[in-house]
Image (cartoon, rainbow, N blue to C red):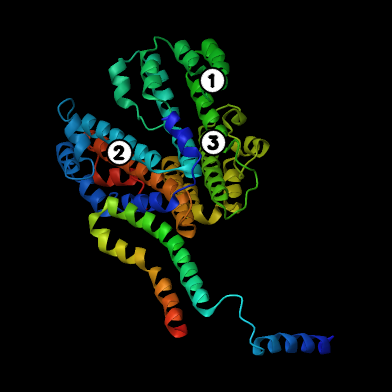
Amino acid sequence: MSSQGTAKRGRSSNYEYVIARVRSRRASLFDDDDYRKLVRMGTGEIARFMEETEYESEMNALGSRYSGVDLVEYALNRNLAKHFDDLLRWSEGALYDYIARYLRKFDVWNVKTVIRGLYADSDATEVEDDLIRAGEFSERRIDQLLNAGSIEEVVEQLDDTIFGDSLAEAYEVYEESNVLVPLENAVDRAFYEMMLDGLPDNPEIDSPTGLYVEFLEAEVDFRNLRNALRLARSGADIDPSEYYIEGGKLFDEQSLAQLASNFDGLVAAVRESTYGDDLDQALGALEDAENLIEFERALDAALLEYADRLSNRYPLSVCPVLSYILAKEREVDNIRAIARGREAGLEPDEIEQELVIL
Amino acid sequence: MIENIALVVNAVLQEGTTGAAPAIPAGAAAALAVGLAALGSGYAERGIGAAAVGAIAEDDSMFGRGLILTVLPETLVILALVVVFILG
């Protein structure tokens, strides 16, 4: 993929083509009615329902090896990877660069999965099924990671990637404490910081780069907000700045450190911010119910809505693509939640609360 | 100053009436108009065509609509063609 990438970078962006295709795929995602039907099905019925949709080829390919909820889950992962690879295949020029940067998110996911697998002594094939091969890592690198015998080997293999430095640092902490959190944080932070790295600080607001930066800042802000809220609610005595991701405009390191210990102050600060209007409902629910899970769903929905608004306001930019990526991820998460929920015997109403539907 | 402008304008107008040949003859100017219009619509169709092909790739039933939208800018050339008939 990377050799293909350098060849594509020289050309000009083909926004029209990519966005026409992406909009069409966006429109064919599951809607409210489909979810309402799915929530009332058993696991076998869900699998059959999916065979008649978008996921048909993946369901058939994996059908002989898995069954039930596992089949649904792996088909979802594979379908996600297929669609996101398509995005990279279509796009050229700066657009390719933007999308590839964002899709490194799945490299993060894969690295974390491999590390967790090694930590928990899982089987390599089991880990392999959980990977989503949509990021920038080549097939070969992923296979090498899978064959690694220890976490140290993984860290060494990633030495020449963007995660190299921060992972090496975190590995020392890991060796002392034997918990995965520092490693996972290192990967996350390397990703988010690299994403905004090299992009201008104050680009023109209507330019494609400006919109990309605006969207990424929103995502970093939401991520920080989520971390801060979790810390504030759990009351754990952890330094919030350890989890702080640079690049957002909502918090700086100091204000986050102060606010994380003060739950009401944090909510008030968000209400005052530029996202206040978007998150108004969610914040109200948070204050009433004091239910963090619901608020996180609301955050997801708000980010999705924000991406949609950007994509309608600036149709020929990277925003529709990012909005599609988010929506697709939400769909996969939703279906997985339904399938797992049904397997665990949850009531339809309970599952519906878990879903992020716009 | 204003008197000067009047002088210049008169000079220009008189040059036309004295029968000097225009820099571009009428026929060539019309051809140029059609050519430029075609260039403009070609550029417009570039983006629309790309989007239309993208849409058709996802959904075959978009073919008719995509085709119509792609050739819409062609009207510019047809309008430019009118100039040729007016002059000719």
**What amino acid type should be assigned to the residue bearing mark 1?**
Gly
Task: Name the element at disc 3.
Answer: helix
**What amino acid type should be assigned to the residue bearing mark 3?**
Met
Give the quarter of the image for residue A54: top left
Q: Position of residue A125 (x, y in %)?
A: 28, 18
> Can you say whether A318 is above or below A148 in the image?
below
Could you classify mark 3 by the number of other residues whose Cα lies within 10 Å: few (under 14), some (14-19), or many (20 or more)? many
What's the chain of the residue with tag 3? A
Whether residue B72 appears in this view of the structure is: yes
Give the quarter of the image for residue A339: top left
Q: Position of residue A256 (x, y in %)?
A: 62, 38
Q: Earlier in the sequence, mark 2 or mark 1?
A: 1
A172 with respect to B8 (left or right): left
Q: Nearer the viewer, residue B76 or A203?
A: B76
Q: Position of residue B39 (x, y in %)?
A: 47, 64
Q: Position of residue A73 (x, y in %)?
A: 26, 33
Alpha carbon separation for disc pair 2 and 3: 29 Å
Would you name the residue on which mark 1 appears?
A164
Would you name the residue on which mark 3 appears?
A195
Q: Nearer the viewer, residue A129 or A137?
A: A137
What's the chain of the residue with tag 1? A
Could you classify mark 1 by the number of other residues whose Cα lies within 10 Å: few (under 14), some (14-19), or many (20 or more)? some
Q: In front: mark 2 or mark 3?
A: 3
What's the chain of the residue with tag 2? A
Alpha carbon separation for disc pair 2 and 1: 33 Å
Residue A18 badge: none
**What amino acid type should be assigned to the residue bearing mark 2?**
Ala
Could you classify mark 2 by the number of other residues whose Cα lies within 10 Å: few (under 14), some (14-19), or many (20 or more)? some
